[in-house]
Image (cartoon, rainbow, N blue to C red):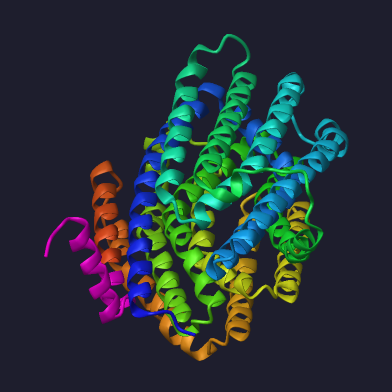
Amino acid sequence: MPISNSKNILSNKRIAKNTFLLYFRMLLLLCVNLYTSRVVLNQLGVDDYGIYNVVGGIVAILSFLNSAMASGTQRFLNVEMGRNDENALKKVFLTSLQIHLFIAIIIILIAETIGLWFLRTQMNIPLERGVAAGWVYQFSILSALFGMLAVPFNAVIISHERMSAFAYISIIEAILKLLIAFLIVWSPFDKLIFYASLVSLVGLINCFIYGLYCARHFEECKQLTLHIDIPTMKQMLSFSVWTVFGSLGYILHTQGIAIVINIFFTVAVNAAQGIANQVSGVVSMFTSNFLMALNPQIVKLYAVGDYENMYLLIFRGCKIAFCLMSIFVIPLILEAPLILQIWLGIVPEYAVVFLRLVLIIALVNSFSGILSTAKGATGNIKTYQITLTTIGAFHIPLAWLAFKLGAGPEYAMYIYLIIVIILQIFRVFFVCKDVGLPFERFTKEVLLVCLYTFILSVVVPSALHLWLPTSYVSSAIVVFVSIITTACTAFFVALSKAERGVLINTIKNRINIG
């Protein structure tokens, strides 16, 4: 039963408003993250920065269950909101909170046994920094636990599409992280330990604010009981057990490969990888913010059976996600050496090649989030997750083999790029098959359009990059031309006439024109 046109209009306006709020949040976070990264790297030094990234990565691997449940929680909340079932909504939230508490206990036990053994016996940490690495590990566990407990509340805010609250809370978090960057300069003791302790404190504050806001604004969060709803828990765990595979795969590709790199190389290489991942994460915020506003609508449209509007939303979301990513990825890839030099001052070895490869991977992966949301809306994800995770699992053994044969650390990213391309092909196939979307239609309206857009966008800035002499001025010219070229190509090539009209009207409404 299709929803009415008036509801479609309201949904589009809500998506536009939420996207605007999330981009305001993202711009602030972008500035804060870029500045704090420079300060932290310069204050800690390359080796300590690498230690923080790789030690925190051990805890991130142990926390993969949490990220699996996060997507499952949001999916169930969105479905019940689409059905307007208030009682079921309360059950989902309470069950999610109970599951996350249980996961927190499991992670503490594993982290303080197997994880601690791995840190002390297997990691390549400079001997004189062993004590500091141990403290960083403990504070990283605390940060992970606070993040875990915040997930159900975060999911409620996003599912209710209260992006203003989400943005404001994120701004508070960003300000606190900026404060840390200033405080680390006057650290009363070891800077690495001091930094890790303050980061965990920010996690605690963030968790408290999320919980307080939800308790005051959402009925399902106001009455917390110890009652366990077995049917709801079984349903959520049955769904989430398969998202565990997908989450584990992602964690192994990011944090797991960092540990493998550390075993074969040094913490300085981990610092280079950490810098590249941070830039990729900042750039990915441009698409993730848009998807955050879009994803609830996709699930709700599926829940009420409005498949055609869901298809259109998927098409639009995939194209915009790719174009938004391209606007930033293309100039960053072309001018990576100079941009890193200006940004960091200290540029770790391998940082440039890591950055370029990670950005290409992020571009290929740009609309995987929308496809995963569409697949998750069906509730049938077992075969999907097993297939994708099995393919992705080849990353670590292949990287290990490459390192054993004498390859440099950057080959881990070359291998992952090939795997990501294969994964994206399978992801498209599964989604089209299970939501009834013709593969040929998706190929024509999304894949080919994105390919044409990228080719047309990259030609002119690449020519300028090769032709102009290396300097700050020429880099600025390449970046400016690349952004303008990509934006224009995206507007006239990627977007249909109807989509251009929607975009223009949204901009007019936003600045009170017309």
Looking at the picture, does residue 113 appear above or below residue 414?
A: above
- Camera-side residue: 460 or 39? 39
Looking at the picture, does residue 389 appear above or below residue 348?
A: below
- Camera-side residue: 75 or 177? 75
Name the main secondary structure of what is drawn in magenta. helix
Taking 238 as reference, is 90 left or right?
left
Residue 320, how many percent across, how many down?
Answer: 38, 68
- Camera-side residue: 75 or 433? 75
Q: How many labels does the image show?
A: 0
Residue in the image at 78% along x and 65% along y: 238
Determine which quarter of the picture holds residue 261: top right
> Is residue 298 at least partly visible in the picture?
yes
Residues drawn in magenta: 488-514
Residue in the image at 56% along x and 44% along y: 350
Please identify the residue farthest to the top as the structure is shown.
188
Residue 60, how many percent across, how many down?
Answer: 69, 43
Residue 365, how many percent across, how many down?
Answer: 53, 65
Looking at the picture, does residue 133 appear above or below residue 62?
A: above
Q: Quarter of the image containing the C terminus?
A: bottom left
Taking 314 as reference, is 193 left or right?
right
Residue in the image at 74% along x and 47% along y: 98
- Residue 194 belongs to the span the image colors magenta: no
- Residue 503 belongs to the span the image colors magenta: yes
> Is residue 414 at least partly visible in the picture?
no
Residue in the image at 54% along x and 64% along y: 81
Determine which quarter of the picture holds residue 448: bottom left
Taking 395 as reference, is 472 left or right?
left
Residue 5, how many percent across, how many down?
Answer: 34, 79
Taking 110 as reference, is 38 left or right?
left
